[in-house]
Image: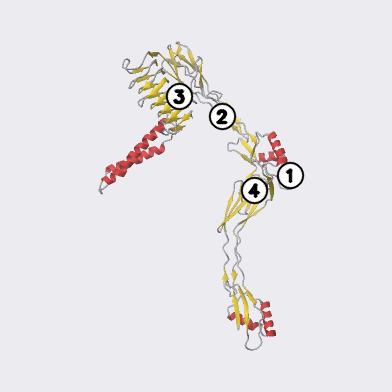
Amino acid sequence: MLRLHLTRENMTATIQELDVDTGELTDDGLARDLKKQGISFGVDDRALRKVVSMYNQSGRLENSTIIAQGKEPVTGSTATLQPHFKTALLAIQENDSDSSHQLEISELMTCGDLVALLESPRPGKEGMTVTGLPVAPDEPPEIELTIGEHLDLDEQTGRITAGASGYPEILVCSKKNKVFMEIKLTPAVTIDSEKMVAELFLFPPLPGDPIPDRDQVIALLAEQGVIFGMNIPAIDELITRFATTHPLDGYIPVARGMMPVHGQDSHLRFVMDVGPIPGKIQPNGEIDFRERQLFIGIREGEIIAVRMAATPGEPGKNLLGEIVAPVPGRELPVKVSDDACFDEQTGEVRAVHSGVLSITGDNTIKVCAMQIISGDVNYGTGNISTRDALKVSGSVKPLFTVSANGDVDIEGNVESALIASEANIIVKGGILGEKSRLQAAGDIDINFIEHGRAFSDASIILRREAYYSRLHAGGDLHCDKNSRVIGGQLVAAGQITCGTIGSVNAQPGFVAAGVQPKKLQRMFDLQRKREKFEKKLVGLPSKSRGREPSKKLARLAKKFKKTTKYLNRIDLTETIT
């Protein structure tokens, strides 16, 4: 009798009990008995002979014996990376502390060096149980390989070489049955997209390796094409500091190109004194809030201003030695009224008739007569419409309209009235009432406004307060540092500067800089229109009471789609021409 024990995987067979009824036990007899019990692979001949000898000598099996051993399968492997660079651990001292941590650093590889070798996948090998059944090998883990920038892979040979001098690194992490492997190279020299700044990054050298010298650093820069703007003193200082403290401060600029000097736009140089223009940024960065000087007298034939020609600028040079062209200045179009003229040849702006001067924006000059209203604009004067400049010594009473081609200066208040000017508007009192509206092609300069509206194609100056009002500027919107704005809207195509905005107990305000006010208003109108169509589209099917949808529904859907299309096309920053 032969009693065997097999492991669960049938990879090992052990004789635990042996009893032969007749005759002497032989090697062939034991082998036949093993085959009868299915053992057909991996029988150990030496173990078999040992069992036979032990049994024939003592008539029994003194201990269990492994008689057959299967063949374990060999798991294959996917493509693997074999690094070809040296690394070392560097102790980094913590700031203001005795503790330190270790950082793994690699050697500096130069462009073209072999960084790693991508080895081909190796297939697995099949195993076999002691019963002669094949055992398939386990599937190797899936590997996802990422090859970073500045590295080149030769698909045929598997060689990964450095596309630039730098420090290679291999990162490996596992997740379930997948291995993520990344090889990357930190370049020693980086150049910005405009090729104007080159920065250097160096790890401390590995033990036994020399510290890079000036010539090596210059060679690293030259490798990237840098031939202009090297800062040799900065390179020497970096190497000295590197040799004494082993800095790890990231990239440090070591070369700079020469930026071009862009040309200046043509501009008007005023021959006569026109006084301060509020809202202009002064050389010290502060905003000029001095009062504008209006109604400057001018005589017939007098030169008002001269257009200074635009300059072409000066070219620069990038790190590669390439010429960088400057942006030439733009020619300023000069606009004049009928009472002023502009000579394209000389660039001079002269007065055709005597009058007062009005300056709108940066390029519009008007000369016109001046009209004075000694008191209020009321039922005694009626509405005012003039081609001249206008000075109102009093206030503009409710529901009256003032319209002028020149500057408008109001000493008093604007009370629920409309003020329009093709030039500038100054209100030294206040703007009161929901029906108050100021509309100017030039600047608007006001002290305070309450529940009113001020729309300027140029800039707006607010000196004191604005309560629940709309201030829209096609240029900048400047508020005095001591001003206060509660609720309402501040919208400017340029920049917005202000004092205090909002209050804990007030409704929130709306502030938007760099946004074209007319585009914003168009967007609000389209949003309201779309919401109106949407409500009708939702309610119309319920009114049809199961009948076939009407043509009205189709028309509404078409209008809704068209409105949405227009809304999506609006660019709030695009200048309206």
Amino acid carrying label 4: it is: Pro
Q: Are marks 4 and 2 in contact (CB under 8 Å)?
A: no
Q: Tag on residue 168?
A: 4
Farthest residue, direction front: 505
Residue type at mark 2? Pro
Residue 210 numbered tag: 1
Counting from the top left corner in percent of width and height, residue 299 is at 45, 10
The disc at residue 483 is none
Which quadrant of the rendered structure holds the N terminus? bottom right
Rendered-image quadrant of the C terminus: top left
Q: Which label's residue is closer to the chain start, 2 or 1? A: 1
Q: Which mark is residue 464?
A: 3
Q: Upstream in the sequence, badge 4 or badge 1? A: 4
The residues bearing labels 3 and 2 have C-alpha atoms spaced at a distance of 42 Å
Q: CA distance from mark 2 to mark 1?
A: 44 Å
User: What whole-number distance in Å separates the C-alpha atoms at marks 3 and 1?
Assistant: 68 Å
Q: Mark 1 packing: few (<14 Cα in 10 Å), some, or many (20+)?
A: few
Q: Nearer the viewer, residue 384 or 483?
A: 483
- Of the pair 141 and 248, the residue shown nearer to us: 248
Image location of residue 147, percent across then percent down: 59, 50
- Residue 66 to residue 253: above or below: below
* First-in-chain label (3 vs 2): 2
| Secondary element type, mark 1 | loop
Q: Which mark is nearer the camera, 3 or 2?
A: 3
Q: Nearer the viewer, mark 4 or mark 2?
A: 4
